[in-house]
Image (cartoon, helix red, strand yellow):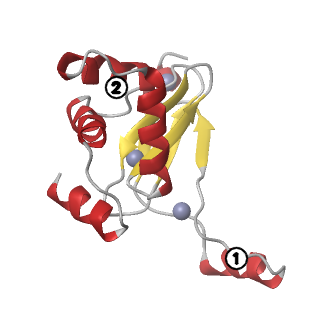
Amino acid sequence: MDELLKELRAKGYKMTPQRRAVITALLECGKFPTAQQLLAKVKQAAPDVSLDTIYRNLSLLIDLGLVNEIHLPGRGNVFELTTNQHHHHLVCVRCGKAECLDYCPVSAQDLEKAAEQGFEIISHSLEFYGYCRSCRLAG
Ligand SMILES: [Zn+2]
Ligand SMILES: [Zn+2]
Ligand SMILES: [Zn+2]
């Protein structure tokens, strides 16, 4: 929490009660809550918060690189606090579970190709879709 606070300040944002509530909910919900699950959590402390408010705060945190958004087919989007390390996700198309892939398979050369086209990349997101271990075992 302290580090996120520093990060927000460094980028010129204040830790408002709403932002704090959303970040606390992300910490407490564990891995990959949906916006609705975050809303339910935030509402325990602040009953008049709306889903809109959750989305607005999430999108700011995503823009700042503090939160990852992962698209799960059929389940919408889920969220996680960004760990220090930039990483990607493996998403099971059968059960909709996501797992972290703790490294980035995008090489510097890949990014240079975009630069050759005159494009300046500031960030990227990448998800891998397939079947998780338990779905594979279940056949
Ligand atoms: Zn699965
Ligand atoms: Zn992750
Ligand atoms: Zn990457």
User: CA gap, disc 1 to disc 2?
Assistant: 34 Å
Q: Amino acid at mark 2?
A: Leu
**Helix, strand or loop at disc 2?**
helix
Q: Residue at x 62, y 37 (%)?
A: 129
Q: Residue at x 41, y 20 (%)?
A: 50
Q: Identify the residue under disc 1.
A: 120
Q: Identify the residue under disc 2.
A: 38
Where is residue 117 drawn, in percent x and y? 84, 79
Count neighbours of disc 1 (C-alpha within 10 A) and say few if under 14, some if 14 to 19, many if 20 or more.
few
Where is residue 106 drawn, in percent x and y? 60, 67
Residue projecting furthest to the right: 117
The answer to which of 68 and 47 lies nearer the viewer is 47
**Helix, strand or loop at disc 1?**
loop
Mark 2 sits near ligand 2, with its Cβ under 8 Å away: no
Residue projecting furthest to the left: 2
> If the image is split into quadrants, where does the C terminus sit?
top right
Q: Residue at x 50, y 21 (%)?
A: 135
Q: Amino acid at mark 1?
A: Glu
